[in-house]
Amino acid sequence: MKDSLLTGTRIRPAPENHLGEDVIQEARRRFMGGALMAGAAAMAAPAVAASAESLDIPEWTRQLGPGVGTHPYGMPSRYEANVQRRESPGLTRTKQSSVSFTPLQSLFGIVTPSGLHFERYHAGLPDIDPAEHRLAIHGLVEQPRLYTMDDLLRLPSESRFHFVECGANTAMEWGNSAVPTVQYTHGMLSCSEYTGVPLKLLLEESGYDRKLGKYLLAEGSDGAALTRTIGIDAALDDAMVVYAQNGEMLRPEQGYPLRLLVPGVQGISQVKWLRRLEVGDMPWNTREESLQYADFMPDGRYRQYTWIQEAKSVITTPSGGQVIMDKGYHQITGLAWSGRGRITRVDVSTDGGRNWREATLQAPVMSKCLTRFRCDWNWDGGPALLQSRAIDETGYVQPQMKQLREVRGTRSIYHNNAIQTWKVAEDGVVTNVQVS
Ligand SMILES: Nc1nc2c(c(=O)[nH]1)N[C@H]1C(S)=C(S)[C@@H](COP(=O)(O)O)O[C@H]1N2
Ligand SMILES: [Mo]
């Protein structure tokens, strides 16, 4: 299969996002066979000087293209066919319970195209007729309510950009991981514009019990009937019942026709195919918050309800599986986010955390949303260890893996927000490593 846009440019993505032996060999040949100098010289003038030949009229300009009426819903160019969600080869999965990862290394800006949003489901995808779907609000309320989709679409709406990250994102890095690419280390992360109804409005309409109503139970109508407890503070703050994503109705994978969005909170609480919200006075302690998504602490205790996704960042280019084809100028770029608000600063290191430089943050920088950062870099051809470190508006600094292990021990699965290291070898091959 053809590589995407970046083929033949200065940083080469690995086909299928796995480092193919052919790509490594090609990089080595370039470096060892003296091609480096020629390559570097050619690259020094970025846009190839215009020649008579390069101004020849290409074939596609000499004819009419096919009619556009043949594409009622658009698809990416066929040359981008390699940019796909993928299931991690290292994870156990079934047809009904799986996860596919977002190709972060291939994306630009902060928005994840809907067709590339990661998907995590515990009991397959329900096929829900929106005309028959209902949302119930009940429990400690004066007036239980049953909403149709039409009812919800008539209510005042809001649109906001937020990330969704699975609490198990980057889980493999708790071990001494060999996960090859950023798609698999960090790809249970996506960002969209969501449209829906503020949950506060629905709760007020139902007359929820302001004294005793401290928690909500959210339940999905998939075969997993997935349930999570939501604190009333988050529900009244910025939570939404959403039906649209990136300008269109939710995709089936993302919970069509209705999902809960609790910004900044781990993915499991973003209950898809949402069918009911029950107001209660205690946490429910469901399977998804007792058996799963809890943290084994080093003292033997089991930490529950750690649901905010703390500040985190990762460099997406250059990243594992890519090959840097020549020395000289490269832009280091990546993503930063925090479940507690805005990102205020991202630092980048090329020497494994000894020296740091402040990266440029791309506007807009929004709360509980992905932020794109960039940093100029002149690669001298020597070995390098690339890291990024995010700081959020609370002053929280993303920890080194070592610092995180000091607090959390080695038995954790969830909530790994440690600094990621990519090693650049002298032949330009980029791999996933951990530094102590
Ligand atoms: N009803 C329901 N909601 C669900 C799930 C599910 O299996 N069923 N998976 C959860 C998990 S673990 C995550 S990480 C997010 C992922 O959202 P996405 O599939 O839109 O990326 O959905 C959550 N909501
Ligand atoms: Mo998840």
Image (cartoon, rainbow, N blue to C red):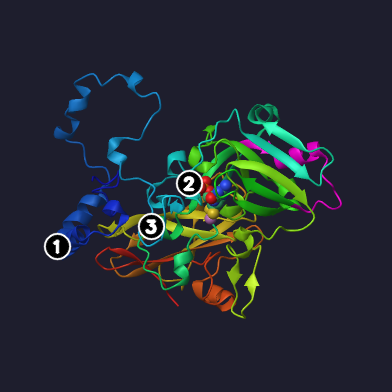
Q: Which of 196 and 57 is in front in this view?
A: 196
Do callouts 2 and 1 mark residues in contact (Cβ within 8 Å)?
A: no
Residue 354 at x, y = what percent? 46, 73
Residue occupied by mark 1: 34
Which mark lies nearer to you, 2 or 3? Answer: 2
Relative image position of residue 108 (x, y in whole percent)? 42, 45
The answer to whether mark 2 and mark 3 are in CB contact below 8 A is no
Hey, which residue is sitting farthest right in the picture? 211
Classify residue 140 as left or right of residue 67. right
- Label 2 sits on what residue type? Gly
Label 2 and label 1: CA atoms lie apart by 53 Å
Circle 2 SS class: loop
Give coordinates of residue 130: x percent, y percent. Answer: 58, 30
Q: In this view, does 205 lie to the left or right of 230?
A: right
Instruction: Tell me the amino acid under the disc marked 1.
Output: Gly
Per the model, the C-alpha gap separating discs 1 and 3 is 37 Å
Q: Can I make out residue 240 in this image?
A: yes
List the residue tagged with mark 2: 124
Q: Residues within 10 Å of mark 2 (few under 14, many from 20)?
A: some
Q: Is residue 159 visible to us here?
A: no
**Residue range highlighted in magenta:** 195-215
Q: Residue 88 carries which label?
A: 3
Q: What element carries label 1?
A: loop
